[in-house]
Image (cartoon, rainbow, N blue to C red):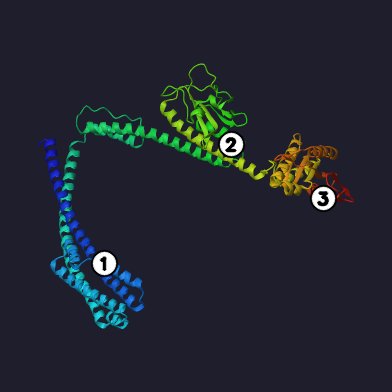
């Protein structure tokens, strides 16, 4: 007998046994389904009978509550509960549809009749209570007969449940036995099928241990060790050996493809780790300079063959200026107007060379077509910067596509970090500046004073503090209104800011008090600058709502380190001089001096 004939007979027998086994499995599954149906039916009946007992006790509680307390809410709840009950026929029909037999329905119907009898007694008790005969109502609802009827309802429900338990247990036991029998038959058939398969497999393998298998085994061993240089031999046989050789060739091709995918996955994981570290570093940046240094370090690592630049928008000049570059980009200018870049115009990544023809940007200094990428950095719809890249000439499409995704992620992280830094700077400026005058406020003054004091003490360099107080400022508020007082404060603040364009710092401490710090000013230089400020304030002429506010003067207290004592006491020394200036008639400059090692106002 030929090998193919034996194989065909064995295959037919295996198929027949498999089909028979599947049929027995289906029969076993049907028996198990009947078992589950019986259990589910029992759960449905339990729920229905539980609802019946709950209805009886709920109506009893509401009726008793009304008879005892006379509270009409109990009567309303009683009538609502009673109105929601279905008739005995409807409730029995529902259980008959669910599968209950006549004897079970008879037991349950008896319980329902007793329940209706209880309802009649509840109605009678309520009517008696409404007529003022509370004693009769309580006698009905709390009497022994009423309790016995409640027990009869519970007993009939228990009888119904007992009958259900008996029937369900019988059905479950029968379904279980049937399922077990079919399952046993299925297992036997599966065992016979497996035994037949093993016999045929042994016979075929014994007859087919030939030289092609031996030659293929070496290839399989090498491929199992992931030696993808092993090439399966060509087989001219159109049989199992040929199929095996073809399968090994496909396995080798799949292994090579899997190796390539693993390399790409490792590269992608490395890039994502690099982007993660970049994001962490960007989040830790305290200034735009820090951000630029982070980008300069990480950008060449993320795209090692993509030269590029980072541009940041200069709002004062409305220009994109280069913050840093890497790998020596050759074509884009270091500064250009935002309108010169199509990516900034459209708010999208722009590539003039690629799958679709597009227009090159005007900021490129190139005569021919070059492959570049412009990625805008945006925050809340506003362009705050741009990433520019030059693509390598001989890169394949998959490499460009994969790297393009990394560049988009890089741009998103940089844009978010840059927007956060700008927002932080705006908030810091708002927190450190006086809204009315635009001068730095007391918080900024405390920081600057400590910095300048430490520097002056360390270098033994002069530092001057000038305290200023507007004379009779309350007069402006009382005579012309607070808007006029604000106008005076703004004008004085402008004078102080304009007077210190060379060196120094002006602050508003609060109210009508200002202070100026002049690092590097000697006492004579500071006094000359103070007199200039005094005259500028005296020359102020302010009109408010068509009325001139009158003359504006100020009192000045001046102190200089090291002439007037320790640097950390400079503010107190100048303040003491200011108080003396106000006490001596205002509109004057008073310089502090040192007497016997103690600071005093002269």
Above or below — where is 460 with respect to 148?
Answer: above
Q: Which mark is residue 579?
A: 3
The answer to whether residue 396 is left or right of residue 127 is right
The answer to whether residue 413 is left or right of residue 505 is left
- Pick the residue in front: 310 or 436: 436
User: Can I make out residue 211 in this image?
Assistant: no
Q: Residue furthest left?
A: 1
Above or below — where is 52 with respect to 579?
Answer: below
- Pick the residue in front: 519 or 230: 519
Q: Are discs 2 and 1 less than 8 Å apart at CB?
A: no
Residue 139 in the image: state x and y as whole percent: 28, 82
The CA distance from mark 2 to mark 1 is 75 Å
Q: Residues within 10 Å of mark 1 (few under 14, many from 20)?
A: few
**At x 33% / y 75%, what residue is drawn?**
66
Q: Which residue was labeled with disc 1?
A: 83
Q: Are discs 1 and 3 less than 8 Å apart at CB?
A: no
Residue 582 in the image: state x and y as whole percent: 83, 49
**At x 75% / y 49%, what residue is drawn?**
474
Q: Residues within 10 Å of mark 3 (few under 14, many from 20)?
A: some
The secondary structure type at the circle numbered 2 is: helix
- Pick the residue in front: 539 or 304: 539
The secondary structure type at the circle numbered 3 is: helix
Which mark is first along the chain, 2 or 3?
A: 2
The answer to whether residue 161 is left or right of residue 62 is left
Place residue 53 in its image quadrant: bottom left
Which mark is first along the chain, 1 or 2?
A: 1
């Amino acid at each position: 007998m030929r090998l193919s004939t034996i194989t065909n007979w064995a295959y037919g027998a295996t198929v027949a046994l498999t089909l028979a086994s599947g049929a027995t499995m289906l029969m076993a599954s049907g028996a198990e389904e009947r078992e589950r149906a019986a259990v589910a039916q029992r759960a449905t009946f339990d729920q229905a009978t539980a609802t019946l007992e709950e209805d009886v006790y709920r109506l009893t509680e509401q009726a008793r509550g009304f008879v005892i307390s006379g509270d009409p809410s109990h009567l309303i709840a009683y009538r609502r509960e009673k109105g929601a009950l279905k008739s005995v026929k409807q409730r029995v029909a529902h259980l008959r549809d669910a599968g209950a037999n006549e004897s079970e329905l008879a037991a349950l119907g008896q319980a329902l009749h007793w329940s209706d009898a209880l309802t009649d007694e509840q109605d009678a008790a309520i009517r008696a209570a409404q007529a003022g005969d509370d004693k009769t109502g309580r006698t009905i609802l709390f009497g022994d007969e009423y309790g016995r009827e409640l027990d009869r309802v519970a007993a009939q429900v228990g009888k119904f449940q007992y009958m259900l338990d008996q029937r369900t247990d019988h059905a479950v036991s029968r379904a279980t036995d049937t399922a077990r029998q079919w399952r046993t038959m299925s297992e036997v058939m599966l065992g016979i099928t497996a035994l037949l398969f093993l016999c045929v497999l042994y016979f075929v393998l014994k007859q087919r241990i030939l030289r092609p298998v031996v030659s293929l085994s070496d290839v399989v061993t090498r491929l199992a060790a992931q030696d993808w240089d092993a090439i399966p031999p060509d087989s001219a046989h159109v049989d199992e050996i040929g199929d095996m050789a073809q399968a090994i060739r496909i396995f080798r091709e799949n292994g090579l493809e899997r190796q390539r995918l693993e390399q790409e996955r490792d590269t992608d994981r490395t890039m994502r780790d690099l982007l993660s570290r970049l994001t962490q570093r960007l989040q830790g940046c305290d200034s735009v300079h820090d951000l630029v240094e982070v980008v300069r370090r990480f950008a060449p690592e993320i795209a090692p063959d993509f030269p590029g630049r980072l541009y940041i928008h200069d709002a004062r000049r409305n220009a994109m200026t280069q913050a840093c570059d890497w790998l020596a980009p050759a074509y884009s200018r270091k500064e250009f107007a935002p309108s010169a870049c199509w990516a900034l115009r459209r708010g999208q990544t722009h590539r003039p060379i690629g799958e679709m023809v597009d227009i090159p940007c005007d900021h490129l200094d190139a005569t021919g077509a070059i492959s570049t990428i412009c990625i805008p950095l945006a925050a809340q719809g506003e362009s705050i910067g741009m990433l520019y890249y030059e693509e390598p000439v001989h890169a394949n499409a998959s490499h460009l596509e994969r790297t393009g995704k990394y560049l988009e992620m890089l741009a998103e992280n940089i844009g978010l970090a840059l927007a956060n830094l700008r927002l932080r700077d705006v908030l810091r400026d708002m927190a450190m500046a006086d809204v009315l005058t635009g001068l730095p406020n007391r918080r900024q003054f405390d920081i600057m004073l400590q910095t300048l004091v430490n520097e002056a003490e360390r270098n033994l360099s002069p530092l001057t503090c000038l305290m200023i107080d507007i004379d009779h400022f309350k007069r402006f508020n009382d005579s012309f209104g607070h808007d006029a007082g604000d106008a005076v404060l703004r004008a004085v603040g402008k004078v102080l800011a304009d007077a210190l364009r060379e060196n120094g710092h002006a602050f508003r401490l609060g109210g009508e008090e200002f202070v100026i710090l002049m690092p590097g000013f000697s006492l004579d230089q500071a006094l000359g600058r103070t007199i200039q400020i005094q005259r500028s304030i005296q020359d102020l002429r302010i009109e408010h709502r068509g009325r001139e506010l009158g003359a504006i003067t100020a009192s000045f207290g001046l102190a200089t380190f090291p002439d007037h004592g320790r640097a950390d006491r400079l503010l107190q020394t100048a303040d003491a001089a200011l108080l003396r200036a106000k006490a001596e008639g205002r509109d004057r400059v008073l310089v502090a001096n040192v007497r016997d090692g103690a600071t005093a106002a002269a």
